[in-house]
Image (tube, rainbow, N blue to C red):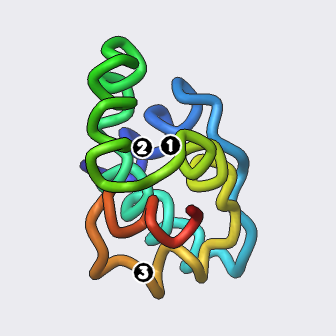
Amino acid sequence: MNHKEARNFSKNLNLPRLFGIPNQIQSAEEIRSQKLEQLPFFEQNWEMLLCELEARGLSDISLLHLKQANEASFWIETQHLDFWELLALFD
């Protein structure tokens, strides 16, 4: 996903603006979009997401907190984690 696609993805999901230095923001937007690319599917299939969260021992509030993560440095520092590992950080 290129930078323009990542920015549009973030806007479509109403994700908050990222804070940091400009080159961090650009990288972080792309990372965040890659990590959250499953969200549109899960938001359309909420029950499936809730079942998966329960199976993993995670609360649904963790998704809200992950979506609100607005520090570019967070996304860069955690880029090695997958979607579920990121959720666990906010549980």
Q: Mark 2 is on which residue type?
A: Lys
Residue under circle 3? 78
Q: Determine whether 81 is above or below 40 in the image.
A: below
The crowding category of the residue bearing disc 2, from other C-alpha atoms within 10 Å (few below 14, some 14 to 19, many at least 20), is few
Name the secondary structure under disc 2: helix
Residue under circle 1? 7
The crowding category of the residue bearing disc 3, from other C-alpha atoms within 10 Å (few below 14, some 14 to 19, many at least 20), is some
Which of pointers 3 and 1 lies earlier in the amino acid sequence? Answer: 1
Asked whether the residues under the numbered discs 2 and 1 touch, taking CB atoms below 8 Å apart as contact, a structural biologist would say yes
Residue 13 rendering spot, x and y as whole percentages = 54, 29
Q: Determine whether 72 is above or below 80 in the image.
A: above
Which of pointers 2 and 3 lies earlier in the amino acid sequence? Answer: 2
**Nearest-to-viewer mark from 2 and 1:** 1
Q: Mark 3 is on which residue type?
A: Thr
Q: Which residue: 30% across, 75% down?
A: 81
Residue 67 rendering spot, x and y as whole percentages = 59, 47
User: Toward which corner of the image does residue 54 lie, by quadrant?
Assistant: top left
**Nearest-to-viewer mark from 3 and 1:** 3
